[in-house]
Amino acid sequence: MRDTILAVVIGLNILCGVLTFFIPEMGNFILLTISTIFTLLALFDAFVQKKHSLMRAFPIVARLRWVFEEEREKIQQYFIEDDLNGTPINREKRSIVYQRSKKEIETIPFGTQHDVYAKGYEFVKHSLFPTDHHHIEGERILIGSDKCSQKYNASIINISAMSFGSLSKNAIMALNQGAKLGDFAHNTGEGGISPYHLQGGDLIFQVGTGYFGAGETKNGKRVFNDEIFRNNAIRPEVKMIEIKFSQGAKPGHGGILPAKKNTEEIAKIRAVKPYTRVDSPPSHSSFSNFTEMIEFIQKVRELSNGKPVGVKLCVGNTDEIEAMIKEFSDSNNYPDFIAVDGGEGGTGSAPLEFTNYIGTPLIEGLVFINKTLKKYGLKDQIKIMASGKAVDAFDVVKYLALGADVIGMARSFMLSLGCIQARECNLDTCPVGVATQDDDLVEALVVKYKNERVQNYHQKTVSAVKEMVAAMGKDSISKLEAQNVFRRDKSDKISPLDEIYYN
Ligand SMILES: Cc1cc2nc3c(=O)[nH]c(=O)nc-3n(C[C@H](O)[C@H](O)[C@H](O)COP(=O)(O)O)c2cc1C
């Protein structure tokens, strides 16, 4: 094959040479130049470069493979995938976010594309006596245990943690302004509070193991610093604090900020060296057992003047988590909320094995946390925030029915900003300016339009939740129960989720 390709390329080059010799016109000179470049490239591929066997065997032609490989995701999305099979978030779900964000038509014609007889098909049962969706209650939830003096009245849907660094400044500004317009909360992510977070929207200040905005580097180790934390935590925008243990996309692995995205500005905010990869440690340096952890939660609560403090985790070893909750009960001190993230959760950057094979999926994790809090009599004190691919109102209804009090969404809000699921968040090449620090790409995201989309998506999704709840004949979102959601199993039996998960 190599000889044939070389013969064709060189033959064409000679032909162009002869043509130019007899008819010395501009067009022919251009042809000759192009064919000469191709010939030189073919010779380089075949004989000079030694790294790529495919290029040595198929000079020039093999280069197409790299082009297609580069563009694979986009080709897949635009030409191959159907509405239900794109991953991680399928086209149907992505489209509903775009439609709700832009306030475009959000109805679909001609019936469902879902196979309603397939194993795993889920639905809720409606009532013969639907209620009025304009008067559905329960869209706000008061978060704060009896240990907390500044309870927060949260929306049932909030923006889950994503840092400035992982996302661009324009994305963070649009999210925060959207949160302000729609009166819901925006989680800072573990990168700390940047000026872009301070647009007036409510903040959940996340404290990760790197203690960015909450600590300093001492003897090469990131440690918590009371004063640095306090200065940020007492800001009026900060409504709650979230201590991060793990996230579903990489449990047991600290955060990763790729070197390319660690610009001078981000490095300054995090107090690290610019343009180096910043890995947060996998565990906290402030405590190493449950007793110390509870003391830390209490200290953080006091330093923030009594704001609600939560812990974020993806469920791993259930014995450990049960021991933690038992300790909360025994010591009569506890966090105000637990944010449970599913193994299916998103990330800007994670090792493949951690993303694919570590961490309990959200439903099992959520059910476990809910059951265990109830077992130790703490469900009234500790609220549950659930995150893991919640996109449309059915996802929200299902997770609330299974025991969540509020829902966190990360990628759905990225989609509302115009994310096209290019899956380049770790490369700094995000084509829509959401997950990049490249100035030209960031400019493409215009904050004053995208903030409204964030608000619209939130508002329309909450409305859709209310419409579903009304169709089910209920008058409050808080009355959703696991027995209201049904699933078809492989033997064709339809069971309510309480039978599957709470028996
Ligand atoms: C770009 C990106 C950055 C993230 N950064 C953080 C972070 O800093 N801290 C954290 O706890 N989780 C982080 N997450 C995880 C989300 O907060 C969330 O838990 C997870 O993606 C599940 O929600 P989703 O399925 O709605 O995306 C990040 C997710 C994404 C997509």
Image (cartoon, rainbow, N blue to C red):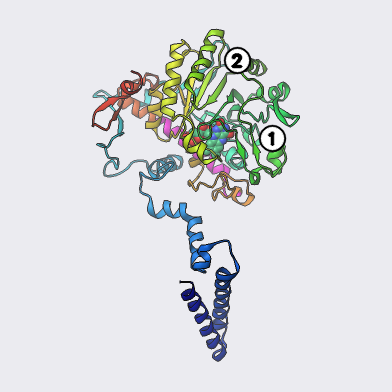
Mark nearest the camera among 2 and 1 is 2
Q: Earlier in the sequence, mark 2 or mark 1?
A: 1
| In this rendering, position of residue 330 left or right of residue 393 | right
Tell me where residue 397 sits by quadrant. Answer: top left
| In this rendering, position of residue 465 left or right of residue 443 | left
Name the dominant secondary structure of the magenta segment. Answer: helix
Say which residue label 2 marks: 294
Q: Is residue 121 above or below residue 441?
A: above
Say which residue label 1 marks: 270
The residue nearer to you, when weighing 236 against 147, is 147
| In this rendering, position of residue 106 left or right of residue 213 | left
x and y percent of residue 128 in the render?
23, 24
Q: Amino acid at mark 1?
A: Arg
x and y percent of residue 33 in the render?
58, 78
The residue nearer to you, when weighing 123 against 141, is 123
Please tell me whether mark 1 sits on a helix, a strand or a loop: helix
The residue nearer to you, when weighing 37 against 142, is 37
**Pointer 2: residues within 10 angstroms few (<14), some, or many (20+)?**
many
| Rendered residue at 59%/66% (across/down) | 49
The verdict on residue 479 being magenta is: no
| Rendered residue at 25%/28% (across/down) | 494
**Pointer 1: residues within 10 angstroms few (<14), some, or many (20+)?**
many
The residue nearer to you, when weighing 460 against 376, is 376
Tell me where residue 178 sits by quadrant. Answer: top right
